[in-house]
Image: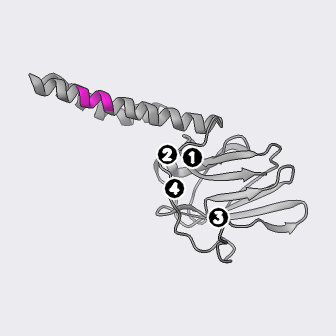
Amino acid sequence: MLVFAIGTLPGLLIAGLLGTLVKGKWAKIFLAFIGVVVIFFALYNLTNAANLLGLNNFSWNSQTSSVTTCANGKSLPDSGICPIEDVSPETQIIKADYTLANDISPSEFTVKAGVPVRFEINPLDSGSGCMSTIMIPGLYNKPIALVNGRQIVMEFTPTKAGNYPITCAMGIKRGALIVK
């Protein structure tokens, strides 16, 4: 939090100083604009906090994927969801690649409740900024750093059906794990 506060301090100081320098009708317009920006970022961060708490799966940064193959090299089915790779009857294996340009790909998975899951992520780039970690709130609560060439393995057993967002440590949604 300290690093976040230090990082936002220059922008907030500049906005405050500019607010004292602008006079007349422009001051009213400038301060209204700054107020709207602050409210937008507050709402944005509240939705990210809700994602971390598992309260919803809303995201400001929803992306459509241009992926045509799954991580196992097979073609993406018409459903747009890569199938589970059943290596053994005891474990469901799901795989994704990570790049800065495309984030995790594929980004949506469906698994069965009550059956252990092994989620393997192959980082082809290192993560950047607050998107440098990955976790699944409610299923795998420990954020793991995305480091180029260092495979990430998350093992867990989902017990309840639902839609679990795949997020960074700050709660920004980057995908979904659907448990049926």
User: Residue 51, percent across and down?
Assistant: 59, 39
Q: Main SS type for the magenta part?
A: helix
Tell whether position 126 is magenta: no
Q: Quick one: label 3 or label 1, which is nearer the N terminus?
A: 3
> Label 3 is placed on what type of residue?
Ala
User: Residue 119, percent across and down?
Assistant: 72, 58
User: Residue 74, percent across and down?
Assistant: 68, 77
Q: Quick one: label 4 or label 1, which is nearer the N terminus?
A: 4
Q: Which image quadrant is residue 25 in?
A: top left
Q: Specify the segment rendered in magenta.
A: 32-36
Residue that extends furthest to the bottom in the rendered view of this protein: 74
Asked if residue 111 shows in the view, the reply is yes
Q: Do the residues labelled 1 and 2 touch (CB within 8 Å)?
A: yes
Q: Do the residues labelled 4 and 2 touch (CB within 8 Å)?
A: no
Q: Which image quadrant is residue 55 in?
A: top right
Q: How far apart are marks 4 and 1 (CA)?
A: 10 Å
Q: Quick one: label 1 or label 2, which is nearer the N terminus?
A: 2
Q: Quick one: label 3 or label 4, which is nearer the N terminus?
A: 3
Q: Quick one: label 3 or label 2, which is nearer the N terminus?
A: 3
Is residue 127 positioned above or below 65 on the image?
above
> Label 2 is placed on what type of residue?
Cys
Residue at which label 4 appears: 127
Residue at which label 2 appears: 130
Asked if residue 22 shows in the view, the reply is no
Q: Do the residues labelled 4 and 1 touch (CB within 8 Å)?
A: yes
Total marks shown come to: 4
Residue at which label 3 appears: 96
**Front one among 178 and 106:** 178
Q: Label 2, secondary structure: give it.
A: helix
Q: Which of marks 3 and 2 is in front?
A: 3
**Front one among 135 and 107:** 107
